[in-house]
Image (cartoon, helix red, strand yellow):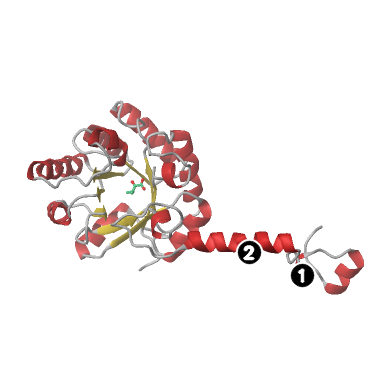
């Protein structure tokens, strides 16, 4: 991994060289810094924030105002990765002009470097308008959570031949509109392989198998931080259990008078000078 700034051109070159793209979601500044230092290529400020950090029961309620705050916090922590802001439900579906105005806010106010929109042919005019204004767009096809009501739930998409054909056409429409990449979520791996081979831009899979040009996971799912427990997620750490254990130990030590100990307290003036203790108290 080079420490050169990742741009949309780098991602395209990675696809051409057959190098896999590693992407993750982040929603706050300290986590974004950790992900960036660890070498993640693309950080998505996903509207999954609605579920995993804001406590909503779907992505539909999250607002532009909430997503702007989270995106700005992430962007301030990232030096290398490409920062992509997820456009929330109804911030781009009303008209291409509305889509451009809101995409522009992510770039101007929150310092995102690209935006992501869900949908294929129906979203392509909005994607085109944003791209024409100079803002890179990442598409998102398959199981698109903002459409879960219309899809009848969070269901794998494109299993039947006609549905697969529609998704291939959607991918073509997005490429035509100028997207720099496409997230493929919750589709059979064979369909993801076909789309990946057919499009010139990188595909980034989540629940779409190993043939995509890159992979993305929701951070809270892969770290065991109270996200979901899905078949397509690999759990890389169990931070939820570690946090609970650490906090339980803290509570016990406070109650038993074990914390704070002598090394955690401030001394009065004379003692402070003698020990060379730092800090203002
Ligand atoms: O919101 C999100 O986190 C996403 C990813 C799952 C791709 O859209």
Please identify the quarter of the rendering in which residue 133 is found. Answer: top left
Question: Viewer-nearest of labels 1 and 2?
Answer: 2
Question: Does 28 sit left or right of 205 as displayed?
Answer: right
Mark sitting earlier along the chain (1/2): 2
Q: Distance between the residues labelled 1 and 2?
A: 18 Å
> In the rendered image, which residue does mark 1 sit on?
263
The secondary element bearing badge 1 is classed as: helix
Quadrant in which the N terminus is drawn: bottom left
Whether residue 109 is visible to the viewer of this picture, yes or no, is no
For residue 249, which numbered disc appears in the image? Answer: 2
Query: Residue 15: percent from the left, percent from the top?
Result: 22, 60
Query: Residue 254: percent from the left, percent from the top?
Result: 72, 60
Q: Dot 1, how many residues are within 10 Å of its Cα: few (below 14), some (14-19), or many (20+)?
A: few
User: Which residue is drawn at the image coordinates 84% and 73% (left, top)?
Assistant: 275
Q: Dot 2, how many residues are within 10 Å of its Cα: few (below 14), some (14-19), or many (20+)?
A: few
Image height of 115 relative to 204, above or below = above
For residue 39, which numbered disc appears in the image? Answer: none
């Amino acid at each position: 991994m080079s420490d050169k700034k990742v741009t949309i051109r780098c991602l395209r070159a990675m696809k051409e060289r057959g190098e896999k793209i590693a992407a993750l979601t982040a929603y706050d500044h300290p986590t974004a810094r950790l992900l960036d230092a660890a070498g993640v290529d693309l950080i998505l400020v996903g509207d999954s924030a609605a579920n995993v950090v804001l406590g909503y029961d779907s992505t539909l309620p999250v607002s532009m105002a909430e997503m702007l705050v989270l995106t700005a916090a992430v962007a301030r922590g990232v030096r290398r990765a490409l920062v992509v802001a997820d456009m929330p439900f109804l911030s781009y579906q009303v008209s291409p002009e509305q889509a451009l105005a809101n995409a522009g806010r992510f770039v101007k106010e929150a310092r995102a470097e690209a935006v992501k929109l869900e949908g294929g042919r129906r979203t392509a005019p909005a994607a085109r308008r944003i791209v024409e204004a100079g803002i890179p767009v990442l598409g998102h096809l398959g199981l698109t959570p903002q459409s879960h009501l219309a899809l009848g739930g969070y269901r794998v998409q494109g299993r039947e031949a006609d549905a697969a054909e529609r998704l291939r056409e959607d991918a073509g429409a997005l490429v035509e509109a100028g997207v720099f990449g496409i997230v493929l979520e919750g589709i059979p791996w064979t369909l993801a392989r076909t789309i990946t081979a057919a499009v010139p831009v990188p595909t980034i899979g989540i629940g779409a198998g190993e043939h995509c040009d890159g992979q993305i996971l929701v951070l809270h799912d892969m770290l065991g931080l109270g996200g979901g427990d899905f078949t397509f997620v690999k759990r890389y750490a169990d931070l939820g259990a570690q946090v609970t254990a650490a906090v339980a130990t803290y509570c016990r030590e406070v109650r038993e008078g074990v914390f704070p100990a002598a090394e955690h307290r401030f001394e009065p003036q004379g003692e402070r000078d003698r020990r060379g203790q730092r800090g203002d108290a």
